[in-house]
C-alpha cells in the first residue's frame, strides 16, 4: 500500500469577510513518490493552496492539512517545513548568492551542513540540474530556464521529501519550459522516492504528471490520470482550460477523416502519421 505524504481534508479559506472562498471544501491525498499537477485558471485557488500547504496562510482556515501523517499547526509547522521545498514563479526573485554555487550553498548553510560536505552536495545537485559547469557564474548571466534549474538544484540539495513547483515555468519561454520538463523527468528517475507537486496552468506541463487535479473557483472539479482528466473536454473548457496540443490535433484529424489514436504525446502522434 502506498504511503500518503499529503492529505487535505475539507479545506476552506477566504481572504475577505464577504463570504467569497478562495478554497472551498478541498479534499485529496498524494502518495509518496508521485508527481501530481494541480491545474486551474487564474483565481482558481492554486497558489492559495500552495501557501496553505507551506503554512504561509497562518491557520485561519477550516479543515485540516496533514503532512507525513501529522496535522499542520503552529506547533508542528517548523519541523514539517524542513521536509518541504518550494520553487516560485519568478527566477529573478529567488537568488541570494553572488554565484550559482553560493546560491545552492545558501540553504545548506542554514541547515548547518559541515563545509567539508557542502562542496560535494553542491556539485551533485548542480550536476543533476545540468548546471555544474556554471557554478562560478553570476545568476544575472543565466537564461530564465537556467535560473530555474539552479533554483530547483538548491531546493533538491536540501533533500526534501516533497517539492512544490508553484507556477515554476510561468515566466519561461518555450525553451526554458522544455528544460524544466526534462529536469523533472531526470529528477524522478534519480530520486524515485521524491514527491513532486506542480501548481500550474500549463497543460503541457500537467500532462507529464502521474495524476492531475483540476480546481475551479476553489473547488476540486476533476481528478485522475492525465488521460482521464483531458478526456473531459467540456468541463475543462468551462474552466477556461485547453487540452494538450497533441490530443487536440489528433481529435481534429479524426474529424477530418484521418484516423489516428488520441494521444498526449506529440512524438507518438507524428510517428503514427508517418506510418500511414
Image (tube, helix red, strand yellow):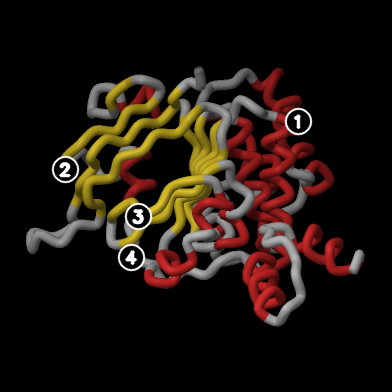
* Label 2 element class: loop
Give the distance between the C-alpha atoms of the residues marked 3 and 1, in whole angstroms: 40 Å
Q: Is residue 40 left or right of residue 253?
A: left
**Which one is closest to the eye, mark 2 or mark 3?**
3
Give the distance between the C-alpha atoms of the residues marked 4 and 3, in whole angstroms: 14 Å
Q: Which residue is mark 4?
A: 43
* Label 3 element class: strand
Q: Nearer the viewer, residue 92 or 129?
A: 129
Q: Which residue is mark 3?
A: 221
Task: Looking at the image, tell me whether mark 2 or mark 1 is earlier in sequence order.
Answer: 2
Q: Is residue 60 left or right of residue 182?
A: left
Q: Nearer the viewer, residue 94 or 77?
A: 77
Task: Looking at the image, tell me whether mark 4 or mark 3 is earlier in sequence order.
Answer: 4
* Residue 189 pos. (x, y %): 73, 33
Q: Are marks 4 and 2 in contact (CB under 8 Å)?
A: no
* Label 4 element class: loop
Which corner quadrant of the image does residue 259 belong to? Answer: bottom right
Task: Looking at the image, tell me whether mark 2 or mark 3 is earlier in sequence order.
Answer: 2
**Which one is closest to the eye, mark 4 or mark 3?**
3
Circle 4 packing at 10 Å, graded few (<14), some (14-19), many (20+), is few
Q: Are marks 1 and 4 in contact (CB under 8 Å)?
A: no
* Residue 74 pos. (x, y %): 23, 28
Give the distance between the C-alpha atoms of the residues marked 1 and 4, in whole angstroms: 38 Å
Q: Any mark on residue 60, and which?
A: 2
Residue depicted at 52% across the width and 70% down the height: 242
Q: Are marks 2 and 3 in contact (CB under 8 Å)?
A: no
* Residue 32 pos. (x, y %): 52, 27
Q: Which residue is mark 1?
A: 124
* Label 1 element class: helix
Amino acid at each position: 500500500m502506498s504511503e500518503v505524504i499529503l492529505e487535505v481534508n475539507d479545506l476552506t479559506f477566504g481572504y475577505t469577510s464577504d463570504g467569497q472562498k478562495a478554497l472551498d471544501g478541498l479534499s485529496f491525498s498524494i502518495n509518496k513518490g508521485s508527481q501530481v499537477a494541480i491545474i486551474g485558471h487564474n483565481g482558481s485557488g492554486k497558489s492559495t493552496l500552495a501557501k496553505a500547504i507551506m503554512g504561509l496562510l497562518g491557520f485561519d482556515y477550516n479543515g485540516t492539512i496533514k503532512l507525513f501523517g501529522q496535522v499542520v499547526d503552529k506547533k508542528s509547522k517548523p519541523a514539517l517545513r524542513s521536509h518541504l521545498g518550494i520553487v516560485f514563479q519568478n527566477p529573478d526573485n529567488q537568488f541570494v548568492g553572488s554565484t550559482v554555487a553560493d546560491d545552492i550553498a545558501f540553504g545548506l548553510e542554514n541547515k548547518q551542513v559541515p563545509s567539508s560536505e557542502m562542496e560535494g552536495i553542491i556539485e551533485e545537485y548542480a550536476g543533476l540540474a545540468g548546471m555544474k559547469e556554471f557554478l562560478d557564474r553570476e545568476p544575472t548571466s543565466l537564461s530564465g530556464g537556467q535560473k530555474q534549474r539552479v533554483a530547483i538544484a538548491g531546493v533538491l540539495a536540501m533533500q526534501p521529501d516533497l517539492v512544490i513547483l508553484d507556477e515554476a515555468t510561468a515566466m519561461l519561454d518555450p525553451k526554458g519550459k522544455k528544460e524544466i520538463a526534462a529536469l523533472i523527468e531526470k529528477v524522478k528517475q534519480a530520486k524515485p522516492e521524491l514527491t513532486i507537486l506542480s501548481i500550474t496552468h500549463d497543460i503541457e506541463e500537467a500532462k507529464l504528471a502521474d495524476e492531475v487535479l483540476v480546481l475551479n473557483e476553489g473547488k476540486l472539479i476533476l481528478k485522475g490520470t492525465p488521460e482521464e482528466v483531458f478526456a473531459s473536454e467540456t468541463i475543462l473548457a468551462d474552466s477556461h482550460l485547453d487540452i494538450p496540443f497533441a490530443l487536440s490535433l489528433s481529435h481534429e484529424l479524426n474529424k477530418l477523416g484521418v484516423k489516428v489514436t488520441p494521444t498526449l504525446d506529440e512524438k507518438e502522434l507524428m510517428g503514427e502519421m508517418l506510418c500511414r
